[in-house]
Amino acid sequence: MSIKKRLSPKDSERLQILRKDIAQARDTFLGYPVSKDFDYSELNDFLKYPINNLGDPFEDGTYKVQTHEMEREVVGFFARLFRAHPNDYWGYVTNGGSESNLYGLYLARELYPNAMVYYSESTHYSVRKNIHLLDIPSIVIRAQENGEMDYEDFENTVKLNRHKPAIVLATFGTTMKEAKDDVSKIKGILKRLAIQNHYIHCDAALSGTYGAFMEPCLPFDFKDGADSISISGHKFIGSPIPTGVIITKRSNRDRIAKGVSYIGSLDTTITGSRNGHSPLFLWYALKQLGEEGLRARFKDCLDTAQYCMDQLHNIGIAAWRNPGAITVILPKTPLEIKLKWQLATEDDISHIICMPNVSKAQIDEFVHDMKNTSPVEEEAFEFEF
Ligand SMILES: *Cc1c(COP(=O)(O)O)cnc(C)c1O
């Protein structure tokens, strides 16, 4: 006889409280780049299955409780959007942008074991750790005031190391200022310096999902010179589970693929077992939205960002944003506001990320709070404690 499993009333109550707290926290944040407007309830039944996408999504292995077909469609969608060669792309759904970046750098290091990595000081914190894990020598390049790589510093630094292959970690949408490094400029500099052995990984975790819709276009994709591109799936698209995608050139991944008979597939991914629900969420969202839906979603975000900037200007706050950015940057906000709206703050700036479903009503409330909180009092408050 099986034992009936159930929660105690106290634990059930704790779950209810947790659920309420999470819902409330979700409804009041403006500072982190996460969409909250998704509805995947049609997929609820899939939680009953031990889905595991282990192995290479393009090589069906022995384990059949998987969503490889949908995963391949997700990869194909972004490969097209990023103008990868139709016969030379590969990729998989990762646990997030950080793993995608680790993969891009791993591939680059396998191709060029003696390379130097260059990345700007605005690069996401996960990259430094990835470079450390992979044990690749690296040099930090200065960033311009707007957060974009300082190309002159880049060129001068590469010049000094021109005997080494170059791996460049470009960022398309930096964490604080949503600045975009210009991949074609980087490619041009490497060509000018005649560095034949080079690899450009584009960390587009933040802005990659809408990068193709920017007007004017900003260079970041395969045609512009990238060798691999990362995105996060839980940011602009939205997902209940953190997720990401890495897109690379198939020819490059072929050089590192190793067969594993235990799984009847190729061990081409970072982890063994892989989340099989995330590809399903992404697939579902992409099928619902399509390219046009994503474009419209981005346009709405741009409108909100412009609205936010205008409203802040109206109350005398020097807000600004980078080209094609849905992130509005403003001088560091008082602590009370930072806590209420869960705003990320670095040095002397804060930002609001106008992700889908950040509404104009929320912006109005935020601007109202800003207008009615005295920065002077707040400084005294911070000083006291
Ligand atoms: C969010 C982000 C990452 C990390 O992605 P995760 O999905 O959180 O792992 C890396 N780089 C940039 C630029 C990001 O915005």
Image: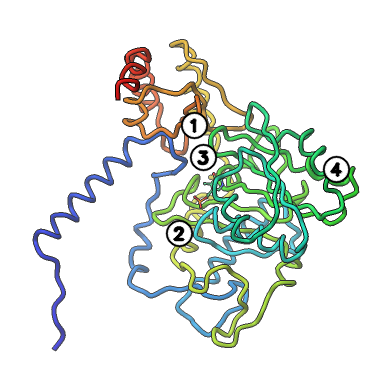
| Within-10-Å neighbours for mark 1: few <14, some 14–19, many 20+ | few
What residue is disc 1 on?
Answer: 346
Q: Which residue is at 73% across, 33% downward?
A: 150
Q: Residue 65: x, y in percent?
A: 45, 78
Vertical placement of 4 versus 233: above or below? below
Whether the residues at callouts 1 and 4 have beta carbons within 8 Å, the answer is: no
Q: Earlier in the sequence, mark 1 or mark 4?
A: 4
Q: Earlier in the sequence, mark 2 or mark 4?
A: 4
Residue 183 left/right relative to 302: right
Observer-nearest residue: 13 or 38? Answer: 13
Q: CA distance from mark 3 to mark 4?
A: 42 Å
Q: Earlier in the sequence, mark 3 or mark 1?
A: 3
Determine which of the numbered discs, if any, sits on residue 385 in the image: none
Q: CA distance from mark 1 to mark 4?
A: 32 Å
Q: CA distance from mark 3 to mark 1?
A: 28 Å
Circle 1: residue type: Glu
Residue 355 left/right relative to 101: left
What residue is disc 4 on?
Answer: 159
Residue 184 left/right relative to 176: right
Determine which of the numbered discs, if any, sits on residue 281 in the image: 2
| Within-10-Å neighbours for mark 2: few <14, some 14–19, many 20+ | many
From the image, state whether disc 3 or disc 1 is nearer to you: 1
What residue is disc 3 on?
Answer: 297
Q: CA distance from mark 2 to mark 4?
A: 45 Å
Circle 2: residue type: Phe
From the image, state whether disc 3 or disc 2 is nearer to you: 2
Give the quarter of the figure containing the C terminus: top left
